[in-house]
Every structure is written in structure tokens, then in C-alpha cells.
Amino acid sequence: MGNQPNSWSGISAKDIPTTIELDPVIYKYTTSGCRVLDIGCGTGKVTIPLASRGFSVTGVDINAEALKMAKSTSELQEIPQSPLFAQTDATNLPFSDATFDMVIMQAFLTTITSKEDRSKVMQEACRVLKPGGNLYLADFGQTWHSRIYRERYINDLPVTKEEGSIIAYDKETGEIAYIAHHFTEKELVFLVVESGFEVEFFKRDEFVTRTGNRVNGFVIVGRKI
């Protein structure tokens, strides 16, 4: 997407972090049978369970290997309405306006290292939602009280060029695997409201990363105005 230095398209599916669990609040804003778009679906951790509950779900991701794994997993399960999967760039979604009742972004915006691309992603999410449709967003918050993250934010800044971003390295090669951005509350809320949404639900949370570190997080539900 754009000029991001870390394209997730080439990351091995098994190395894609998927530690955040779906917050139950999402079910207050959905009804069985509604059309759901899972942006950055990865290997289907969110897409497949939602489909098994009766939702009409489409998962999109830029990583072909992850999508292949997601599709294979879904085919092994007896789901009345199997989810659909498509490889695409979230800044240019291949769907018509007002197609979906809900859009989900679970630990996805953290992978977008360009402010411009984050805005494009959010605008696309708003475009494909029906009027009054909901955006469910869960992502990492800046965790300055943690020495581990405080040092990473500071030491990685010359490379990330953005406060609150960190570098993850490939354990085998030592090369940069990807860059992830952690948000402030103000930053994430303004991104939501400036993209055409009104905040319906907001929650501060604590997430656990794949390395076992605890990090601040946010869960937001926005309604398309």
C-alpha cells in the first residue's frame, strides 16, 4: 500500500501475529445474516468464526499465502454459508458503495505505516458500508509506561519516522520483518471521526502480543454518518 517500507504480502502466513480476540461487543451491533467485510483477515481468525455464526462474511487481505490457509481451514469446517476470500489492497477495495452492514479491522491499521494510507483505508471502509453501518476497530495503543516499548519507540524512531511505531525483526535473518504502529487515543479517534464515522462505543483494553508482552489497546465501534 502506497510507499510503505513493510509490505505484508510476502510475510509467511505462520508468522502473521493473531493474538487479539474479538470483543463480544461486536454482537450488539450485528444481526445474523448481515453482510460483514473483514479487512486484513489474515488466516481467517475472525472471518471463519463469524461465518459459522451465520454471518455473510468476506475476508480480504494482501497476503496470498494467508488467504490460501484461511480458505483451506474454512473448507474443513461444516459452515452453512462459507466465507468468501479475496486478495486485494485495502486502499482500493473492489466492492461497490454501500455493500456491507459491518466492516471489521482487527489489529490491521497497526500494519499500515503511512498516515495517508491509513486515511485511504478508512475512507474505503466508509464507502463500502451502508448508511448507518458499523465499523468495528480494535488496535494497539502506545504503551509508554512499559520500558520495553518506551525504548523501542525511541530507538526505532530514526527508521520508522513516526512516534509510537516499532520494528519487528526476522529471527532467522535479522532483517526487518515489518513495522507496526501503536496509536494514541486521540490519533485513533480522530482517524475514525474524520473518515465519516460517529463513535458509538469506545473501550480501553490490554492486549497480549505473540511474544507475551502486554500492551495498551483500544476497541471502537463507529457508525457511518
Image (cartoon, rainbow, N blue to C red):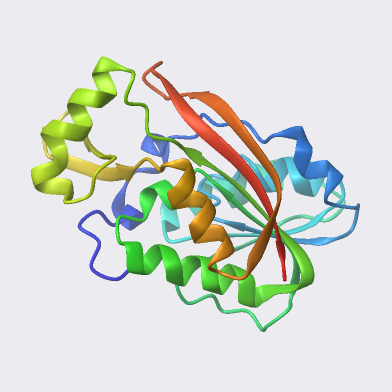
- Compared with 130, 191 (above or below) is above
Q: Is residue 117 visible?
A: yes
Q: Is residue 86 left or right of residue 83?
A: left
Left/right placement of residue 89 relative to residue 52 reads left
| Residue in the foreground of this view, choosing between 69 and 34 | 34
Q: Residue at x 74, y 69 (%)?
A: 100
Total labels: the figure holds 0
List the single residue furthest toward the bottom: 96
Identify which residue is drawn at 16% across, 29% down: 172
Please identify the quadrant where the C terminus is shown. Answer: bottom right
Residue depicted at x 43% and y 51%: 187
Would you identify the image quadrant in which residue 142 lies? top left
Residue 133 location, quadrant:
bottom right
Residue 21 sits above or below residue 7 on the image:
above
Residue 78 visible within the image = no
Q: Quadrant of residue 20?
A: top right
Q: Position of residue 193 (x, y in %)?
A: 58, 62
Where residue 217 sits in the image (x, y, percent)? 51, 32
Residue in the picture at 29% in, 40% down = 164
Q: Where is the N terminus found, in terms of image quarters?
A: bottom left
Foreground pick, 165 / 191: 191
Q: Position of residue 169 (x, y in %)?
A: 19, 34
| Image x and y of residue 177, in percent | 22, 42
- The residue lying furthest to the right in this view is 32
In the rendered image, the residue lying farthest to the front is 186
Vertical placement of residue 2 versus 143, above or below = below
Q: Position of 206 compared to 99: left or right?
A: left
